[in-house]
Image (cartoon, rainbow, N blue to C red):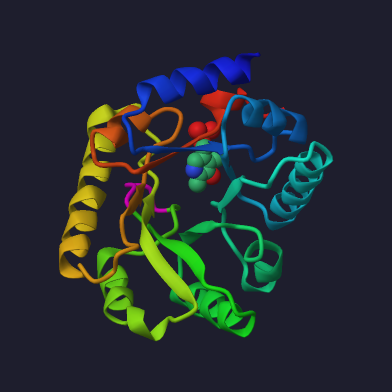
Amino acid sequence: MAIYDNIKALRASLPDGVKLVAVSKYHPFERIVEAYEAGQRDFGENRPQELQKKVIAMREWLGSRGLEDDVRWHFLGHLQTNKLKMVLPYASLVQSVDSLHLLQEINAWSLKNNIVTDVLLEMHIAAEESKQGFVEEEVLEIMFANTSYRGVRICGLMGMASHVDDEAAIDADFSRIEDFFHYLKDLFPELECFRELSIGMSSDWEIAVSHSASIVRIGTAIFGDKE
Ligand SMILES: *Cc1c(COP(=O)(O)O)cnc(C)c1O
């Protein structure tokens, strides 16, 4: 019941055009079903094996009810190149491409398997050293070379703000990636799919929405704390 109410409340607060990804990582499949029954169709996972298991469970659950599979899975975690086959056939968007090597491997795997993989480039925007992701110069280099990646479509940017209770710091993080996102959109108008800015989690999605977020990724505020 709580999950249903949380989703309804979030949907009512999010502006039109902002996609809600329910981050279901670490939560059992039954909770994903509850969210599905509240109308939720986009889910986020951060571990390859768990993603694969849940996708298959969801297909079975939907199939046994005669329903079509209309769920979109987003991969959000660190992805090792030896795990691509557990993720790329299932994820409709890989949001966490954080190295050139990973991008190249996703491209090669996709070409070999005759698919095109939609990805976001994960940027390092937080003040903390530990956060992974590209800096602006690296993203620019990739964007200028985008026509050489025919197995991937670069659909936008993803970022995580600093883990601080300081709203001004979060605001500054999001403001920077927002500016860079608009700059790239203007620089590459021919890249039609480049329109997603994935910023904002349970504690900072309202700030993210005020900075042009097109996707928010919300776990705790939907599913509660991890078990
Ligand atoms: C876990 C996770 C989220 C959701 O975080 P909450 O604070 O639980 O909303 C969002 N994005 C990424 C990349 C995550 O790993």
Residue 65 coordinates in the image, percent (x, y): 80, 36
In the displayed structure, would residue 169 be above or below residue 134?
above
Q: What's the residue at 21%, 44% (across, down)?
A: 175
Side (left or right) of 40 relative to 95? right
Q: Give the position of the C terminus as an image quadrant.
A: top right
Quadrant position of residue 15: top left
In the foreground, 209 or 81 = 209
Relative to residue 117, is residue 123 drawn left or right? left
Q: Residue at x 62, y 67 (%)?
A: 80
Q: Is residue 222 above or below residue 125?
A: above
Q: Position of residue 142 (x, y in %)?
A: 33, 76
x and y, in percent, of residue 93 in the image: 51, 57
Residue 217, how many percent across, how many down? Answer: 47, 39
- By secondary structure, the bulk of the magenta-drawn segment is best described as loop
Q: Quadrant of the N terminus?
A: top right
Height in image: 10 above or below 163?
A: above
Q: Residue at x 36, y 27 (%)?
A: 14
Q: How many marks?
A: 0
| Residue for point 66% across, 65% down | 89
Outermost residue toward the front?
Answer: 66
Q: Nearer the viewer, residue 41 or 167?
A: 41
The span shown in magenta is 125-129
Q: Nearer the viewer, residue 190 or 99?
A: 190
Magenta stretch encompasses residue 36: no
